[in-house]
Image (cartoon, rainbow, N blue to C red):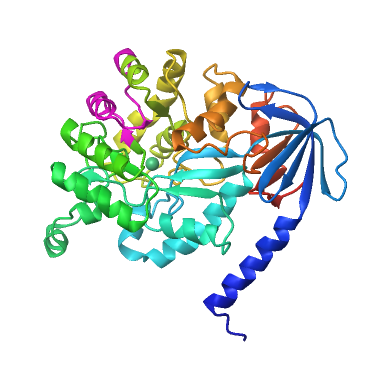
């Protein structure tokens, strides 16, 4: 077997990208969804070179020298963005035990398939909000070693002692004593100095953003899913330090008081937001805070709570109660005018099923075009990225095509026929 040195790999990937750069691809779309105006604008030809959209021509135009992809009868939309996934894992009845049994290597191998499923489902960009190998998965995708979406990784989420994301939760006292209390390096803080250190550690780890767990969580080995777990001062210290590094901050939150503190502390987005009410809607609008609902996760855990043994008994009542609530809260929040970004929490539910979230949104009365905006223009804003989420010249060539009109049948988003990311085709009719 030939030995491949890192230098040879680098050279090989350089040659591949150089030859791709010379090519021009013409995507002849039967229809195009304009994510800014939320309308279908008719047939268009997207001319792609160097991983970007160079030109958008009216109709199905001939482009001399370009390789043509015929997408007649299809609607092209910008590649979708899921703002809340966990590529390192996928829940199953053994998840709690696997934490003790498996190594990061095991999780990494599993994540290869999860990343590919996500991309082939039309999600060309994701925000990974915590997982043992998410930063490494991102790097492997960027190096072209595995197929997957563009990943913005939070790395280890930041929690407080005993909170959602304290890695020692549920350990017996001997193990807990042997390991000692986790600190900012492991993502557990108590006080503002710890908060700053934890953010700086994420920077050192190579994170792209910060995730905090502002309240208890459904799946953590603890009784409360909604109690506040940070002080406002701790959240402010996280947010201020995050800004030093150009980071946004995503806050997991179910209970109202924890959400209030997170919003006032200046976080970018509230994840889940289960027990939001009119008062919180108003506060979010005042602060310009985004809401990432993750209805998919709610539905999945409420369903699995009925299966004996799927979750530990300490988790089961939380999953049944909180899970069932999220879709209802989402419906009220968007009607109240809260800004919505698309997120599923996949890894709780199944990777590759991300597009089901569109249907869950539309079921509450949200127009399909608005739902598509949450995963395109809106999600790009949440990420603070200006060259994804639109099919316009200069934008990255992230394109998804579905057969027919997704504005009249949102279920078509689960029938993706074509996926391009950075100008590279990963799925074709
Ligand atoms: Zn999550």
In the rendered view, does 103 fall on the left or right side of 39? left
Q: In which quarter of the image is the N terminus?
A: bottom right
The residue lying at 30 percent from left, 52 percent from top is: 202
The one nearer the camera, 331 or 58, is: 58
Relative to 69, is 331 above or below? Answer: above
Residue furthest out toward the bottom: 1
Instruction: Determine which quarter of the picture holds residue 146.
Output: bottom right
Pinpoint residue 24: horizontal percent, then vertical percent: 77, 50
Pinpoint residue 283: horizontal percent, then vertical percent: 31, 18
Ligand 1 shows up in which quadrant of the image? top left
Pinpoint residue 297: horizontal percent, then vertical percent: 44, 37
Q: Magenta region: which residues? A: 251-280
Instruction: Determine which quarter of the picture holds residue 226.
Output: top left
In the rendered view, does 17 fall on the left or right side of 102? right
Please tell me how many numbered marks the rendered image carries: 0
The residue lying at 56 percent from left, 32 percent from top is: 376
Q: Does the magenta stretch include residue 255?
A: yes
In the rendered view, does 208 fall on the left or right side of 58? left
The one nearer the camera, 226 or 368, is: 368
In the rendered view, does 7 fall on the left or right side of 59? left
Q: Is residue 376 magenta?
A: no
The one nearer the camera, 386 or 151, is: 386
């Amino acid at each position: 077997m030939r030995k491949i040195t890192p230098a040879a790999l680098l050279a090989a990937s350089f040659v591949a990208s150089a030859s791709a750069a010379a090519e021009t691809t013409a995507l002849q779309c039967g229809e195009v969804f304009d994510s800014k105006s939320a309308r279908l604008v008719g047939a268009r030809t997207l001319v792609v070179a160097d991983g970007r959209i160079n030109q958008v021509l009216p109709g199905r135009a001939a482009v001399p020298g370009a390789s043509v992809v015929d997408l007649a009868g299809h609607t092209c939309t910008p590649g979708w963005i899921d703002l809340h996934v966990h590529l390192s894992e996928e829940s199953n009845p053994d998840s709690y035990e696997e934490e003790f049994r498996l190594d990061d290597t095991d999780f990494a191998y599993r994540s290869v398939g999860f990343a590919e499923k996500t991309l082939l489902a039309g999600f060309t960009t994701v925000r990974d909000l915590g997982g043992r190998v998410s930063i490494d998965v991102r790097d492997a995708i960027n190096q072209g070693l595995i197929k997957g979406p563009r990943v913005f990784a939070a790395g280890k989420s930041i929690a407080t002692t005993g909170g959602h994301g304290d890695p020692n939760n549920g350990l017996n006292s001997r193990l807990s004593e042997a390991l000692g209390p986790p600190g900012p390096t492991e993502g557990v803080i108590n006080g503002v100095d710890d908060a700053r250190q934890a953010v700086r550690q994420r920077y050192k780890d190579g994170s792209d953003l910060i995730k905090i767990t502002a309240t208890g969580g459904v799946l953590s080995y603890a009784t409360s899913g909604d109690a506040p777990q940070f002080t406002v001062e701790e959240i402010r210290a996280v947010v201020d330090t995050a800004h030093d590094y150009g980071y946004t901050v995503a806050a997991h939150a179910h209970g109202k008081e924890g959400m209030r503190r997170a919003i006032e502390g200046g976080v970018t987005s509230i994840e889940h937001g289960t027990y939001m009410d009119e008062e919180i809607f108003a506060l979010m609008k005042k602060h310009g805070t985004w809401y990432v609902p993750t209805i998919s996760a709610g539905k999945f855990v409420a369903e699995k709570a009925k299966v004996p043994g799927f979750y530990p008994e300490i988790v089961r009542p939380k999953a049944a109660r909180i899970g069932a609530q999220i879709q209802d809260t989402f419906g009220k929040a968007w009607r109240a005018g809260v800004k919505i970004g698309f997120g599923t929490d996949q890894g709780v539910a199944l990777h590759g099923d991300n597009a089901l979230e569109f249907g869950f949104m539309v079921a509450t009365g949200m127009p399909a075009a608005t739902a598509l905006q949450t995963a395109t223009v809106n999600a790009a804003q949440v990420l603070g990225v200006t060259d994804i989420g639109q099919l316009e010249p200069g934008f990255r060539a992230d394109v998804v095509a579905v057969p027919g009109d997704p504005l009249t049948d949102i279920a078509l988003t689960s029938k993706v026929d074509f996926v391009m990311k950075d100008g590279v085709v990963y799925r074709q009719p």
